[in-house]
Amino acid sequence: MARAQTLSRNQQIVLDIIQKAKGPLKAYSILFNVQKKGINAPQQIYRALDKLIGMGKIHKIESKNAFVACRSSDCEISKATAFSICESCEMVDEISDTKLSKYLSGFNHKKGMKFKRFNLEFFGICKKCKKD
Amino acid sequence: MARAQTLSRNQQIVLDIIQKAKGPLKAYSILFNVQKKGINAPQQIYRALDKLIGMGKIHKIESKNAFVACRSSDCEISKATAFSICESCEMVDEISDTKLSKYLSGFNHKKGMKFKRFNLEFFGICKKCKKD
DNA sequence: CTCAAATATGTTATATTATAACAAACGTTA
DNA sequence: TAACGTTTGTTATAATATAACATATTTGAG
Ligand SMILES: [Zn+2]
Ligand SMILES: [Zn+2]
Ligand SMILES: [Zn+2]
Ligand SMILES: [Zn+2]
């Protein structure tokens, strides 16, 4: 069984960096930020990222190949993720909307495929960027 | 202005291959398939892909870094895309569901961001794979 | 506790995906 | 024709991700 709670050393280091970040982080940018802590290779980052994603602690923003911390406590398994992405400043915001989540989780494909998981990415210009 | 209809030589070649394919194609797999036609470099593929995406002729499946032909005539601008993806056989199916599309196009973020575009990817096991 | 299994780590090398930069050709239209 | 935008060709390189193997650490059953 996978351990539910405890993170390994590398996993904790990677998670800390992602949680402290203001926006999505790329794998190699994480790598450069942890070299002082003795992590030297991409593998070490990608392995930690994989585990953290599996635990639902972080999510991958597929359109950006970048990673954000989960803010929504509900989605521990990352089965139903939705994000709002600013095309100008790159800001990413996790959307926790029960109605949306229920609507999509209940969505059934005409062709009979039963979905286990979805990922939704919205794009636009955020409020802050509109002012400029 | 962007030309609405006519495709350039390379664009047509790339589109043909994607349209003939049974599933999503990766950029380098397209490249290997067109070397006999005189296309030798990734750039040539990526440029064609970019234009075709802009025209709504193809879509990128972000979670797979792969490309499929648009089957749904409605989404000429790729503002509202949804796909069903089999995690076993990699099959991808474009979902054209007016209700779903309207629901998501009308979705408004609490934080006031107005969305211009979304991409939704559903994952599961397709009917065909379930039989095995 | 002890040993085996599972998980995590370190490391080197390599594969895969994507873009930069520049020069030349082509197509349109004023 | 001349000017402009678009497409092409080409070489090089950047950015993202995985393979493979050796070692270490943690965990839990007996
Ligand atoms: Zn989350
Ligand atoms: Zn913004
Ligand atoms: Zn389409
Ligand atoms: Zn399948």
Image (cartoon, coloured by chain):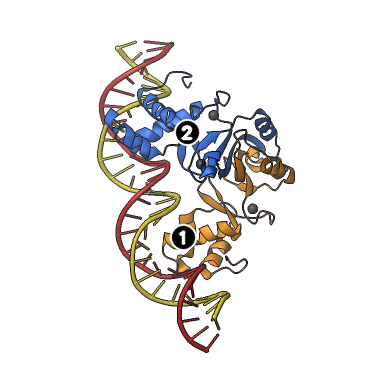
Chain colours: A orange, B blue, C red, D yellow
Residue with the mark numbered 1: A31
Q: Nearer the viewer, residue B126 or B94?
A: B126
- Asked whether mark 1 lies closer than 8 Å to ligand 1, one says no
Chain letter belonging to callout 1: A
- Asked whether mark 2 lies closer than 8 Å to ligand 3, one says no
Q: Name which quarter of the figure residue B41 lies in.
A: top left
Residue with the mark numbered 2: B68
Total count of labels: 2
Q: Nearer the viewer, residue D22 or A73?
A: D22
Residue B111 seen in this snapshot: no
Q: Amino acid at mark 2?
A: Val
Classify B61 as above or below D6. below
Q: Dot 2, how many residues are within 10 Å of its Cα: few (below 14), some (14-19), or many (20+)?
A: many
- For residue B56, side relative to residue A56 (left or right): left
Q: Dot 1, how many residues are within 10 Å of its Cα: few (below 14), some (14-19), or many (20+)?
A: many
Q: Element under label 1?
A: helix
Label 1 to label 2, Cα distance in Å?
33 Å
Classify A25 as above or below D7. below
Chain letter belonging to callout 2: B
Classify A102 as above or below D3. below
**Are the residues at dot 1 and dot 2 in contact (C-beta closer than 8 Å)?**
no
